[in-house]
Image (cartoon, rainbow, N blue to C red):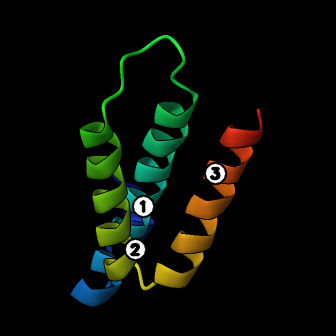
């Protein structure tokens, strides 16, 4: 169940709030995919997660910040 604060308000505000929640969930998925040392991850999984992340970013009006966060995530994981 979503918090009451998100469920109330105009449809456009609710849509952006849902998109922001989805975006954070997608970043969590990308984070764990990047760290998944004991899992077999194919490039299809990575592309699907990235596609969903960028799609959520469009609806959350956060495309620029999303690109920056993805770059930071990849840089952090490739250096470890």
Q: Is residue 25 left or right of residue 19?
A: right
Residue identified by numbered label 1: 23
Q: Which mark is residue 57?
A: 2
Looking at the image, which residue is at 46% across and 33% down?
A: 33
Q: Reading the chain from its start, which is encountered first: label 3 or label 1?
A: 1
Please determine whether, in this image, residue 57 is positioned above or below residue 11. above
Mark 3, other Cα within 10 Å: few <14 / some 14–19 / many ≥20: some
Kindly state the secondary structure of the residue where label 3 is placed: helix
Q: Are marks 2 and 3 in contact (CB under 8 Å)?
A: no
Please determine whether, in this image, residue 8 is positioned above or below residue 35. below
Q: Nearer the viewer, residue 63 or 18?
A: 63
Q: Is residue 55 left or right of residue 20?
A: left
Q: Which mark is residue 13?
A: none
Q: Are marks 2 and 1 in contact (CB under 8 Å)?
A: yes
Q: Horizontal and vertical percent for residue 42?
A: 30, 31
Q: Nearer the viewer, residue 34 or 60?
A: 34
Q: CA distance from mark 3 to mark 1?
A: 14 Å
Is residue 10 in sight in this rendering? no
Mark 1, other Cα within 10 Å: few <14 / some 14–19 / many ≥20: many
Residue identified by numbered label 3: 73
Q: Horizontal and vertical percent for residue 43?
A: 31, 39
Q: Horizontal and vertical percent for residue 59?
A: 32, 79
Q: Is residue 36 left or right of residue 74?
A: left
Q: Quadrant of residue 57?
A: bottom left
Q: CA distance from mark 2 to mark 1?
A: 6 Å
Is residue 54 in sight in this rendering? yes
């Amino acid at each position: 169940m979503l918090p009451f604060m998100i469920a109330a308000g105009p449809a456009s505000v609710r849509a952006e709030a849902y998109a922001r929640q989805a975006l954070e969930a997608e970043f969590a998925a990308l984070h764990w995919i990047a760290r998944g040392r004991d899992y077999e991850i194919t490039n299809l999984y990575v592309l699907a997660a990235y596609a969903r992340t960028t799609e959520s970013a469009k609806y959350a009006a956060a495309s620029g910040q999303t690109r920056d966060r993805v770059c930071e995530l990849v840089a952090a994981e490739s250096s470890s």
